[in-house]
Image (cartoon, helix red, strand yellow):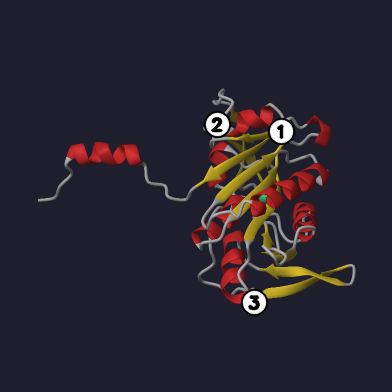
Amino acid sequence: MTRKPRILVTNDDGIHSPGINALRNAAASLGEAIVVAPDSEQSAVGHAITISDPLRVKEIEKEGKFYGLAVNGTPADCVKLALKAILDAPPDLVVSGINQGGNTATNVIYSGTVSAATEAAIMGFPAMAFSLYSFQYRDFSTAERIARQMIAQCLGESMPRHMLLNVNIPSIPYKEIMGVSITRQGRSYFDDEFEKRVDPWNRTYYWMKGHKLQLDESDDYDEVAIRNQYVSVTPLKYDLTDESVILTLNDWKLSIE
Ligand code: MN
């Protein structure tokens, strides 16, 4: 690539989050970084899109300089709008994150961070989602350094269209990270619990909580790689067809009268 790479940056924690600032810095050190991100937190909205309300775009400045564009929509909205209506030229890569909290195993399906990257892949652009594996660890410096290296290496390999990489980064200091592990999406999931509470007007409400069940033991699963202090890189695809069940259903010879 002779010109500098053009990188679209989005997320689900919102344009004002520290994680997108880290990813913007990583992208800007490698090329042109264009930020189009939700104007408010959109964590766990999954692949939702806005179809019944107008989408508005607002220029955001930080320290007196143009920072990016805020959209009153979901992460998938941001990617669609950026690619179809905002960007003058197609990006070489779309990156999403760096999310506060891991997006591994079944969490991937709820993730706005991953969905933004998925949307880009659906539209034919290589995409990477980045998540810092902690909801408490506020230091994004290690994650930024790792994101920069992952982006640089993947751009150097000229990623194919539709390639979708889900990168999870352990929440530990850089020197404690053991390396990079290519992984599969794990199967651990949350054992959901609902705490029943009463509001000041005596109305019942529920608060979802629960704890994650660790079902994965093999080193090639995302959760296990993180536990072993590796950066986890999982290639994803959005075709949800279960090929094995196609054979079963064909055997069943489902029919109508
Ligand atoms: Mn989030």
With respect to residue 88, does 176 lie above or below? above
**Inter-mark Cα distance, 3 to 1:** 37 Å
- Residue type (three-letter) at the residue carrying disc 1: Gly
Q: Residues within 10 Å of mark 2 (few under 14, many from 20)?
A: some
Amino acid type indicated by mark 2 = Ser
Residue that carries the numbered disc 1 in the rendered image: 179
Gap between marks 3 and 2 measured at Cα: 41 Å
Q: Earlier in the sequence, mark 3 or mark 1?
A: 3
Q: Nearer the viewer, residue 194 or 25?
A: 25
Q: Mark 1 near mark 2, Cβ–Cβ under 8 Å?
A: no
- Label 1 or label 2, whichever comes before in sequence order: 1
**Residue 88: mark:** 3
Q: Which residue has dot 2 on it?
A: 188
Query: Mark 3 is on which residue type?
Result: Asp
Which numbered tag is attached to residue 3? none
21 or 89: nearer the viewer: 89
Instruction: Please give left or right for residue 4 compared with residue 192 in the image.
Output: right
Does the closest atom of ligand 1 sit within 8 Å of the Cβ of label 1? Answer: no
Farthest residue in the left direction? 257
